[in-house]
C-alpha cells in the first residue's frame, strides 16, 4: 500500500512500525541532509578561497544561526508536538488553535531576534571571539542572513515542523530541501561571478537569504493548502481562541526544546571562545569540524523528527506498547548509522576536512595548519556520534510525551553541568586536543542520564494515562 492510501490515524496508529517509521523518517532524513548541505555549502565555497579568516568568520556566525534554530523549536517542536497529540486524542479544534498560535508566535519571535542582533551585532561578535581579521566578514554575513533574512529563515523551520507533525513530512522536506539545492546553485553565482573578489562572504550571505525566502514561500503555500485536510490553520482568529492551558501545553514542550538547542549553542559559544584564544587557525579548524560532524547528526535528527509524531500520537492514544517499539526501532537505526560515521571519519578525517579549505589557494601555510588541526579534532569528536544520538532520541521522546521538566533537566545537565566544566578542564590540562575531547566524554555521561530520565517519563506517563 502506498503512503497516499494511509490516513493520518492509520499511519500513526496501526501501520507496522518499521513501515510507519520509514514513511515519516525518510523524508525528514533527506530534508536534514539537504538542509545540512544548505548550511555547509557556504563554508565549502568560502573554503575554495583558501582564506582561513573567512572560514573563521563563518564559524562565528554559525552560532547566531543556530540560536535562531533554538527559537524556532519553541514554536515548531512545541506547536508540532501539541498538534500531533491533539490529533491522537481526537481534539482537532485544539490542534487548529495550536498551529495558528505557533505560526504567528514564530513571526513575532523572528522579528525580535533579528532586531536585537542588528542593534548589538558588533559587541555580540566580539564576545563570540571575533578578531580584527574576522569581524568584518562575520558582520556582513550576519547582517544579511540574520537581520535582513531572519523572519523567512526562522519561520520556514516552524512551518516545516508543523507540516511534519500533521503528517505532511514529504511537503516539509521538499520545502527545506529545495532551499538547500537553490542555495548550492546560487552561492557560486553570487560569490564568484556577480560580486568582485574579496566579497565572497557577502555573496554567500545574499544567496542564503534569497534561498531561505523562497523556501519560506513554498512552505507557506503548502501549509495553507494542507489546512484543507488537516487541523493546520493560519488565521489570527484561531490565536484569539486558544486557551491559557493550550499555550501552556505548547510552551511546556517548546521551551525545553528551545533550551536544549540554546544550551548546545552556548556550549559552542564557549568552544569558539576557547579556540579563538589559541589562535584563528584553531578557530577555523574547529569550525570545519563542527560542520563535518553534523553529517551523522543530521541523519539522526531527521530520524528523531520522523519518530516524534508517532511517539506523541501513540502516547496520547494510550498505545504505549507501540510507542516503545517505535523508540526501540529508531534507536537501532540511529546507533548503526552513528557507528558507521565513527569508522569513516576516523579513517578519512584528512580528506573530509580538506573539502572545506583549499591548501593550494590564498595563504597556503595558514590553510595547511588549519586542516591539520581540523583532522585531529574530527578524529576525536566523531567518537561522540553514537551517544549524541541517544541524547537526541531521549530528548525528542520526552518532548513528544509533553514532559518538559525532564527535557529541561536533561538539557541543563548535559550542556551546563557536564559539557562546559569538562570542556574548560580538558582545555586547561591538554590544550587544543583536550578542548576537542570534552565533547565525547560529556556526551557519554549525558546519555546514561538521558536514558534513565526517559524510562522514568514512560513509567509516569503509563501511570497517569492508566
Image (cartoon, helix red, strand yellow):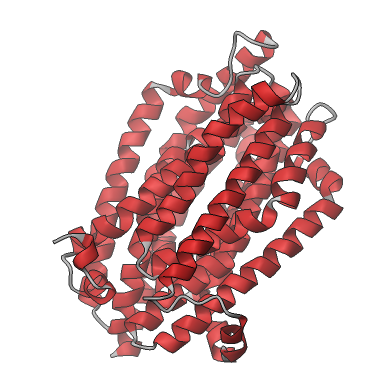
Instruction: State the residue in front, 205 or 258.
Output: 205
Residue 23, given in percent of the width and then of the height, sits at: 26, 58
Quadrant that contains the C terminus: bottom left
Q: Is residue 39 above or below residue 215?
A: above
Residue at the location (51% across, 23% down)?
353
Residue 330 shows in this picture: yes
Residue 274, given in percent of the width and then of the height, sits at: 70, 37
Q: Is residue 428 above or below residue 172?
A: above
Residue at the location (82% across, 48% down)?
121
Residue 414 shows in this picture: no
Q: Is residue 142 above or below residue 252?
A: above
Q: Is residue 113 left or right of residue 71?
A: right
Quadrant that contains the N terminus: bottom left
Residue 244, given in percent of the width and then of the height, sits at: 59, 90
Question: For residue 71, what is the image quadrant?
Answer: bottom right
Instruction: State the residue in front, 363 or 177.
Output: 177
Amino acid at each position: 500500500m502506498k503512503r497516499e492510501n494511509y490516513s493520518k490515524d492509520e499511519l500513526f496508529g496501526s501501520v507496522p512500525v518499521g513501515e510507519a517509521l520509514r514513511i515519516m523518517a525518510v523524508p525528514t532524513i533527506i530534508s536534514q541532509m539537504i538542509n545540512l548541505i544548505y548550511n555547509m555549502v557556504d563554508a565549502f565555497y568560502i573554503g575554495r578561497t583558501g582564506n582561513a579568516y573567512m572560514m573563521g568568520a563563518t564559524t562565528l556566525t554559525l552560532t547566531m544561526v543556530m540560536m535562531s534554530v533554538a527559537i524556532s523549536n519553541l514554536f515548531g517542536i512545541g506547536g508540532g508536538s501539541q498538534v500531533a497529540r491533539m490529533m491522537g486524542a481526537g481534539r482537532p479544534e485544539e490542534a487548529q488553535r495550536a498551529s495558528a498560535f505557533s505560526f504567528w508566535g514564530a513571526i513575532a519571535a523572528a522579528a525580535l531576534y533579528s532586531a536585537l542582533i542588528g542593534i548589538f551585532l558588533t559587541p555580540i561578535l566580539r564576545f563570540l571571539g571575533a578578531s580584527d581579521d574576522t569581524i568584518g566578514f562575520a558582520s556582513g554575513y550576519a547582517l544579511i542572513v540574520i537581520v535582513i533574512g531572519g523572519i523567512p529563515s526562522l519561520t520556514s523551520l516552524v512551518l516545516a515542523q508543523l507540516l511534519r507533525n500533521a503528517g505532511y513530512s514529504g511537503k516539509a522536506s521538499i520545502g527545506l530541501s529545495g532551499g538547500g539545492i537553490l542555495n548550492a546553485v546560487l552561492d557560486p553565482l553570487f560569490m564568484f561571478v556577480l560580486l568582485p573578489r574579496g566579497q565572497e562572504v557577502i555573496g554567500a550571505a545574499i544567496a542564503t537569504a534569497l534561498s531561505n525566502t523562497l523556501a519560506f514561500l513554498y512552505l507557506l503555500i503548502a501549509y495553507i493548502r494542507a489546512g484543507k485536510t488537516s487541523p493546520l490553520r493560519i488565521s489570527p482568529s484561531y490565536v484569539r481562541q486558544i486557551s491559557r492551558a493550550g499555550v501552556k501545553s505548547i510552551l511546556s514542550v517548546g521551551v525545553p526544546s528551545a533550551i536544549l538547542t540554546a544550551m548546545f549553542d552556548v556550549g559552542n559559544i564557549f568552544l569558539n571562545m576557547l579556540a579563538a584564544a589559541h589562535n584563528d587557525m584553531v578557530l577555523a579548524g574547529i569550525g570545519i569540524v563542527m560542520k563535518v560532524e553534523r553529517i551523522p547528526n543530521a541523519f539522526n535528527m531527521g530520524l528523531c523528527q520522523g519518530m516524534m509524531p508517532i511517539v506523541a500520537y501513540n502516547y496520547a492514544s494510550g498505545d504505549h506498547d507501540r510507542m516503545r517499539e517505535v523508540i526501540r526501532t529508531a534507536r537501532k537505526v540511529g546507533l548503526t548509522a552513528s557507528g558507521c560515521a565513527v569508522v569513516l571519519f576516523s579513517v578519512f578525517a584528512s580528506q573530509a576536512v580538506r573539502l572545506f579549505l583549499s591548501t593550494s589557494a590564498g595563504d597556503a601555510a595558514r590553510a595547511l595548519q588549519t586542516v591539520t588541526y581540523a583532522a585531529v579534532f574530527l578524529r576525536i569528536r566523531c567518537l561522540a556520534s553514537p551517544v549524541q544520538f541517544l541524547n537526541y532520541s531521549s530528548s525528542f521522546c520526552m518532548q513528544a510525551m509533553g514532559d518538559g521538566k525532564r527535557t529541561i533537566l536533561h538539557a541543563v545537565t548535559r550542556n551546563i553541568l557536564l559539557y562546559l566544566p569538562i570542556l574548560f578542564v580538558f582545555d586547561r590540562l591538554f590544550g587544543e586536543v583536550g578542548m576537542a575531547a570534552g565533547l565525547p566524554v560529556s556526551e557519554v555521561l549525558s546519555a546514561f542520564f538521558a536514558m534513565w530520565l526517559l524510562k522514568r517519563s514512560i513509567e509516569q506517563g503509563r501511570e497517569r494515562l492508566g
